[in-house]
Every structure is written in C-alpha cells, then in structure tokens.
Image (cartoon, grey):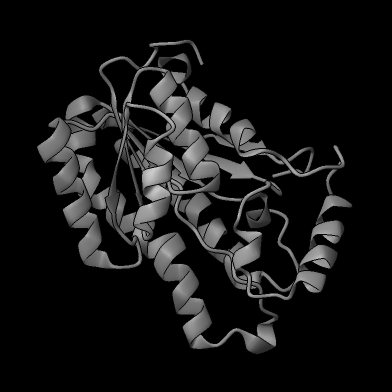
Amino acid sequence: MSARMLESKVALVTGGSTGIGRAVALELAQAGAQVMVTGRHEHQLRETATQHSGITWVVADVARLTDAATTLEEVRCRHHRLDILVNNAGIAPVAPISDATPEHVRQIFDVNVVGLIEVTRHALPLLREARGTIVNVASVAADQPFANMSVYSASKAAVLALTRAWAQELAAQGVRVNVVSPGPIETPILGKTGLPQEQLDELGSGIVNQVPLGRFGKPEEVASVVGFLASPRSSFVTGAQYAVGGGIEA
C-alpha cells in the first residue's frame, strides 16, 4: 500500500498479536494509520507494537462479551474516532464430528462469530461517524470445508453471511463491509490445534497438496489484500469476498 494513504485514519485489529493480525497491523501502520491491536496475551501484543510506532495495544478476549465494550471505549478515549475495523481474531480447533461436543462448538462460535458480532456492534457508532470500513477475516474453508474441521468451517460460513448482510444494511450509512478468505497461511494457528507434531506434519502436507500454487501463504500476502479493502482504493467495493488461497476457490 502507498505510504501515508491512511494518514489520520484509526484502525482496530482484533487478534493482532500474531500471524495475519500482526501483519495487518503493520500494513495499516505503514500506510499512516494509528492502529490498536487486541489479543489475550500481553507479551505478544507488546511484540507487535514494537514493529511500528503507530501500533498500540489493549489486552482483550473477543470471547468475553464485556471486553468488546471496553475495547471500543479505549479506542474512543485514545483516538476519538474509528475508520477501519478488521475482525481477524479466530481459532481453528480440529475435531471430527464425533468429538464435536457442545463445549467445542461454543468455544469456536464464541470467538469466530459471537465475538465478531459484538465487537462490530460496539464499533458501529464510531464507524458511522467516520463513514468507515469493516474487513472480516473468514477462510476458504467456508466454501471448501475441510474434513475434521466442520464446526470451524461452519463458523467461517457464518462470517461470510454476516459480511454480505451487513454490506447491504450499512451501505446507506456509508460503511463498507468486505471479507478476506485466506487459505493455508504460515501462522501459529495450526500449532494451536492440540495435535501432536507428527499429526500436524501430516495435516500440513495434506493441506499443501490441495493448494494449486503448492505452498502455504504468508501473513503479509493476506495483509496486503486487507490493506486494499481498508483503503480509499476500494471505495466502490462492498459485500465482496477476496480469496487469498493460492488457487483454492472460495
């Protein structure tokens, strides 16, 4: 993205402590935005903030409904506005349907869907004032579900539906809403599946075999697309889905 294209803009990136979220925060900050990132682990957030002077942080868990309100109050107090919301926080536990207990389902939906809705709901007054933009992060798994990840895939399909509905609902208020659907990306999320290393290696190999470009993507490759959707260059784009999946269709 062109330097200073987002000068004077304020962005909030959930799940900004590692991986795609960290790369998005840096992308937006390098374009001139003041970026606040959220996450559960302070040490990782501090590390993200060292990447650029335009990045600040607040410890928040999107699965805790009260954290959404406090996060947006922090944005209002620090910056008095919000132009860009990137709903990136997500988890991807692996489980066959036989192991998809109510606890498993609630854990995924609380983060990937309920938390995303609640953060957006609290952000709307500021976004309306700024005629801002929302970028949701889904997954190609919403359109091409993976075996043993049915609940995760369903949660990301919900993110697609929310995006398309919100784009229609908020257009008259000047708020654009789009979604980026990453494919397999080199992030710590696979390591959080709870699988032993041997199974992780097998899973990773199986996934790469499904990618026409034959490799995992990099967080920066997703961040550049998020940056486009957050910028004035996409001013006539809303309700759109951008796949960043190395050829996996979304």
Q: How many marks?
A: 0
The residue depicted at 76 percent of the width and 44 percent of the height is: 216
Q: Is residue 241 visible?
A: yes
Q: Is 24 rendered above or below residue 207?
A: above
Q: Is 247 rendered above or below residue 28?
A: below
Q: What x and y, as percent, mark residue 145?
A: 71, 61
In the rendered image, the quadrant that contains the C terminus is top right
The residue depicted at 74 percent of the width and 64 percent of the height is: 146
Q: What x and y, as percent, mark residue 32?
A: 35, 17
Task: Left or right? Give the position of 81 relative to 118.
Answer: left
Task: Left or right? Give the position of 126 relative to 55.
Answer: left
- Answer with the quarter of the image where residue 163 lies: top left
Q: Is 28 rendered above or below residue 160?
A: above
Q: Is residue 238 visible?
A: no
The residue depicted at 16 percent of the width and 29 percent of the height is: 129
Q: What x and y, as percent, mark residue 161?
A: 49, 52
